[in-house]
Amino acid sequence: MPTLLIRAFRAPDLRKKILFTLAIIALFRFGQTLPAPGVDVDAVRSCLSSARGGIVDAVQLFSGGAMLKLSVFALGIMPSIVAAIVIQLLTVTVPRLQALKKEGRQGQARITQYTRYLTVALAVLDASTVVSLARTGRIFPTCGRQLLRDQGALTTLVIVVTLVAGASMIMWLGELVTERGIGNGMSILIFTQVVAVFPSYLSNIFLLSPFALVTMLAAGIVLVAAVVFVEQAQRRIPVQYAKRMIGGRTYGGKSIYLPLKVNQAGITPVIFASSLLFLPQLVAQLTGGTGPVADWISRYLVSGDHPVYVTAYLLLTVAFTYFYVSVTFDPVEVADNMKRYSGFVPGIRPGRPTAAYLGFVLSRLTAPGAAYLAGLSLIPIIAFVLLRDPGTQQNFPFGGTTVLIMVGVGLETVKQIEAQLEQRAYRGFLRETPVRT
């Protein structure tokens, strides 16, 4: 890794991209610490110092601590991530979006525009919810201080508009990193959010129990190594392309492979499962937390170690894994594309037999992939059982989602840098030859 960074900084164009990405990350973190107008900073700090629990603690990790601080970037990257996932799923099911996807660059531009509209809509909903919780004091149930300087409609509207503008700017910053930086802008920003809260988590655990911190770090190293191993695992299906004569030239005749990852769905099923289980808690808090439905939610769907919560979380993770893989990888489409370019799997006839074979292999890979994601989801629950100290449980940083984000984005970023270095090396072989006259 250090050698890769040294090589990257020696390349002038790649060095500019890395420095540009770091500048965007610094601006992003500044916006997460900048308080929104109308927020009582002293009251927020006082409530944060004594906070234990609360409805927003479930998403604090994914906002880099910005949501509890009611900063300009309080919503974080989640509206953009959820909007991108929803549009990706609708692209497979809605005929209009399917047609746009096949139109190439222009169609992709329209789909990107729809994603931006949906991001703004989700940001309005999230901002209204956060401000409503702040006005009623439900973000910090144990803190009785007023978080907003004014409870009027104008102040509320200004804060909502500020949070929505912040979410829109985050989306723009992610696109800038993708276009002018090292790529994967949204992933890098969510990686920044997750890593930003790690020092505070580790320091709190050290103050509570140094032995627990050492145990967590050792378990975290083993867990990261295991996640890297599974994330890199793939089934390579050989594909042979027949030779074709086009315009007097011979094309094809090459043998490649089709890589199918064990974790084909990535982190999306975990995000979906967490979001769905978070919605009942949010509804219960917004309705005042009274009534039989709210009592049932508080009893079964709030505590992370309750058997009902654990069962629902695991079932949703497995179900979303199969669903997401089925809508993002179409064996029939892949088999048709292979047949169109005279490609075939050795021993399998082109067309429907190839599609059936790919579907069979994919289903066999999805089973261990779903079990792997479900196992990662159980890690915080296991920590709740092993670590008896409530403060240590609350600050447990090595959750399955956290590790997946860090490892997945880290590996992808390294691959992006290596690919750009290789592309630059190949350009060195292309030298201009003077034309003789």
Image (cartoon, rainbow, N blue to C red):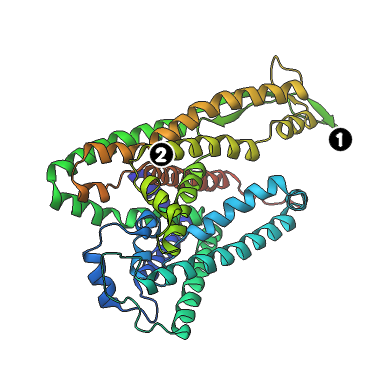
Frontmost residue, 61 versus 250:
61
Frontmost residue, 265 versus 144:
144
Q: Quadrant of residue 43?
A: bottom left
Residue 377 image point, x, y percent: 39, 39
Q: Between tags 2 and 1, which lies in front?
A: 2
Can residue 276 be seen here? The reply is yes
Label 1 secondary element:
loop
Q: Residue furthest front?
A: 292
Q: Is residue 162 above or below residue 384?
A: below
Residue 169 image point, x, y percent: 51, 69
Q: Could you tell me which residue is drawn at 26 percent across and 72 percent down? A: 144
Q: Residue furthest right?
A: 247
Q: Which corner quadrant holds the N terminus?
A: top left
Q: Could you tell me which residue is drawn at 28 percent across and 53 percent down? A: 198
Q: Could you tell me which residue is drawn at 74 percent across and 20 percent down? A: 353
In-image side of 180 versus 386 (left or right):
right
Q: Residues within 10 Å of mark 2 (few under 14, many from 20)?
A: some
Q: Which residue is mark 2?
A: 308
Label 2 secondary element:
helix
Circles 2 and 1: CB atoms closer than 8 Å: no
Give the residue type that dot 1 points to. Gly
Task: Please state the total of marks drawn on the protein image.
Answer: 2
Q: Residues within 10 Å of mark 1 (few under 14, many from 20)?
A: few
Q: Which residue is mark 1?
A: 247
C-alpha separation, residue under disc 2 versus residue under disc 1: 65 Å
Give the residue type that dot 2 points to. Val
Q: Is residue 89 above or below residue 67?
A: above
Residue 7 image point, x, y percent: 40, 48
Label 2 vs 1, first from the N-terminus: 1
Q: Which mark is residue 31?
A: none
Can residue 264 be seen here? The reply is no
Residue 192 image point, x, y percent: 38, 56
